[in-house]
Amino acid sequence: MFKGSMVALVTPMLEDESVDYDSLANLIEFHVTSQTDAIVAMGTTGESATLDYKEHCEVVRFVVDKVAGRVPVIAGTGANCTREAIQLTQCAKKVGADACLLVSPYYNKPTQEGLFLHHKKIAETVDIPQILYNVPGRTASDMLPETIIRLSKISNIVGVKEATGDISRVATIKAGAGEDFALYTGDDETAVEFILAGGHGGISVTANLSPKRVHDVYAAALSGDAESARELDKPLRALHRDLFVEANPIPVKWAVSQMGLIGPAIRLPLTLLSEAYRPTVLKAMQEAGVSNQPSK
């Protein structure tokens, strides 16, 4: 089981919108040396929706190769087409990812039975650990706890990323799925309480900027030290909120570029962070003690 702070890694890009592999290599080192517990490549924050199949597979392969076994690599391989999700998951397995993260099919609004059969088909087709990803704010369909519990009985479906922010779901899913089924939050604002309620960690946007601090917050929460976890989390709270002033990953990519770690480029239809929001994000960075410098 993967535990702790798992960064939802941004994908650096050049001005022509191609992937900036030099910056990606540097980002990977930044996270490994900062005690990030796992790297999630090609998730929502990695702009998975705008990269084509070949690019998607190449980014996952690159991350796996550069990480070189030092921390687990989890590949985002979800799609709203079951066949496409299977192909992406097969690719992730082929290049050596440790697990896959599969977002619920978006746009087409499947029923609960459709969600169950979609994930069941992928799990039966590709023998790799798979983590469900429930984010109804983006997918327009909410995978209910009873569906997650049904899917938990499939041996290689090992956990769920719950991004609803509903802490009550932790106890419900845990009771039905058992202790061996991993529960990860996808909501930075409620991550501490989610872990204290019995979660095993989180897949974090904020960790792109402050990986060591997020690691320490999650470690404290996992140890049951609620007071320390909440105190350590205080400087990050503005980031948790303000990294979503526009659609993710617009604010976080701009913020990471201000740290000098990547260039500012982002792929259409996403755009650079609006100038009106830049002071807000900079202030949140300062509150978190994240240094900013001119971007590349």
Image (cartoon, rainbow, N blue to C red):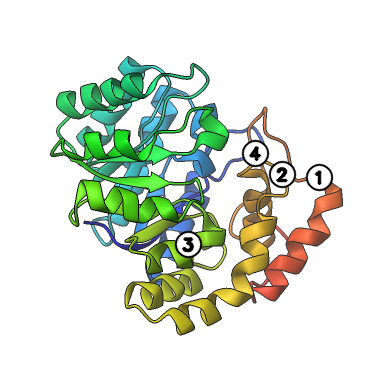
Asked if the residues shown at circle 2 and circle 3 are in contact, with their CB atoms under 8 angstroms apart, the answer is no
Local SS, label 1? loop
Quadrant where the C terminus is found in the figure: bottom right
Q: Amino acid at mark 1?
A: Ser
**Earlier residue among tags 1 and 4:** 4
Q: Earlier in the sequence, mark 2 or mark 3?
A: 3
Q: Tag 4: Cα neighbours inside 10 Å, few (<14), some, or many (≥20)?
A: many
In which image quadrant can residue 259 be found?
Answer: bottom right
How far apart are labels 2 and 3 at the CA level? 20 Å
Is residue 220 shown left or right of residue 164?
Answer: left
Give the residue pinned by disc 2.
Answer: 246
Label 2 near label 1: C-beta < 8 Å? Answer: yes
Q: CA distance from mark 4 to mark 3?
A: 27 Å
Mark number displayed over residue 190: none
Q: Amino acid at mark 4?
A: Ile
- Residue 266's disc number: 4
Quadrant into which the N terminus falls: bottom left
Q: Mark number for residue 191? A: 3
